[in-house]
Image (spheres, rainbow, N blue to C red):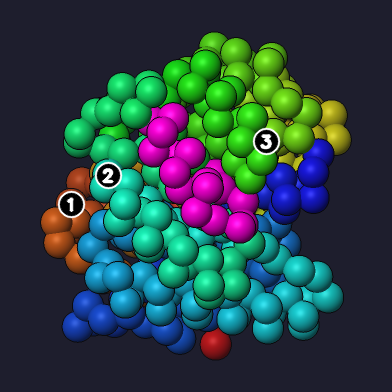
Amino acid sequence: MSSSSHLFRGCGTALVTPFHADGSLDEAGIRRLVRFQIEEGIDFLVPGGTTGEAATLKPDEHLRLIATVVDEARRAGEKAGRRVPVLAGAGGNNTAAVVEFAQAVEKLGVDGILSVSPYYNKPTQEGLFQHFSAIARALQVPLVPYNVPGRTGSNMEPATILRLAEIGNVVAVKEASGNLGQMGAILARAPEDFAVLSGDDALTLPLLALGGHGLISVASNEIPGPMTELVRLALAGDFAAARCIHYRYLPLMDVNFIESNPIPVKAVLTRMGLCEEVYRLPLVPLSSGARARVEAVLQQVELATPAVRS
């Protein structure tokens, strides 16, 4: 693989965005979460995406979030003796606005840009190709398109992803279509230096068995060590050991989506002492029934004991 695509191989965390009780950015909480991730061995960090409630961040907040993650990743990475790349979210459904914002994010020193497929306006496959081509041409850093039809209302088909893979700085795709056949079709024909990353925790193991290259994870907010180890074992061909981790934590992977992401994962991180359970509307706290199910799973996977970090 090229050096740029190799940056985003392994397990990356789609970071939540900690807020204070008044709804403002919790910069200390952001730094605490980044340190926890790096101490636990995560391969790369992905701030400013869906799990980070990016849709409710003002542009200046979004930039401040990413700048904080970049700075803390550098500091904590130096302490850990390794470099932890930052793949920052910058997406939307107005191509010109996304280009402008992605360029502003690039200037913060990120290692790449993750950009979600345009939502609501449901472009054609040619429109999707032109959208991501325009973003890629405007950037010097690598671009990773994010295909998540369940949120965007349209699927980026394998042929479109493969066209994008021919663009020099489009180095990977985050695939959250839920369609393993589609993922296999991409892997069968993608250039050797193009990475296919799972966007679903529970589908990571089968994707890696097909030849995938890693994961952008929600569960690794809570269990970065085990999720990173799962991916590393599978990439090394030790699927028996990887399956043990997969099945142990599958209940957690599933319950993280009992209500809209990131509602459950943020509730869990609050129990762990890593952030406050504060969301921005239209997201609201867990319902009582969902909370009971989350608590039961935490007991099951032995993640109920708070792990407060300074």
Q: Which image quarter: residue 52? A: bottom left
Which residue is at 55% across, 31% downward? 164
Query: Does the CB distance between marks 3 and 1 fall below 8 Å?
Result: no
Residue holding disc 2: 93
- Amino acid on which disc 2 is placed: Asn
Q: Amino acid at mark 3?
A: Ala
Residue 227 image position (x, y, % from top left)? 64, 48
Question: Magenta segment, which residues?
Answer: 128-144
State which quarter of the image contains the C terminus. bottom right
Main secondary structure along the magenta-highlighted residues? helix
- Indicate whether residue 142 is drawn in magenta: yes
Q: Nearer the viewer, residue 148 or 100?
A: 100
> Measuring 58% from the left and 67% from the top, which residue is drawn there?
110
Helix, strand or loop under label 2: loop
Above or below residue 142? Residue 177 is above
Q: What is the three-letter code of the residue carrying label 1?
A: Ser
- Give coordinates of residue 232: x percent, y percent: 77, 43
Q: Which residue is mark 1?
A: 287
Residue 293 lies in the magenta-colored region: no
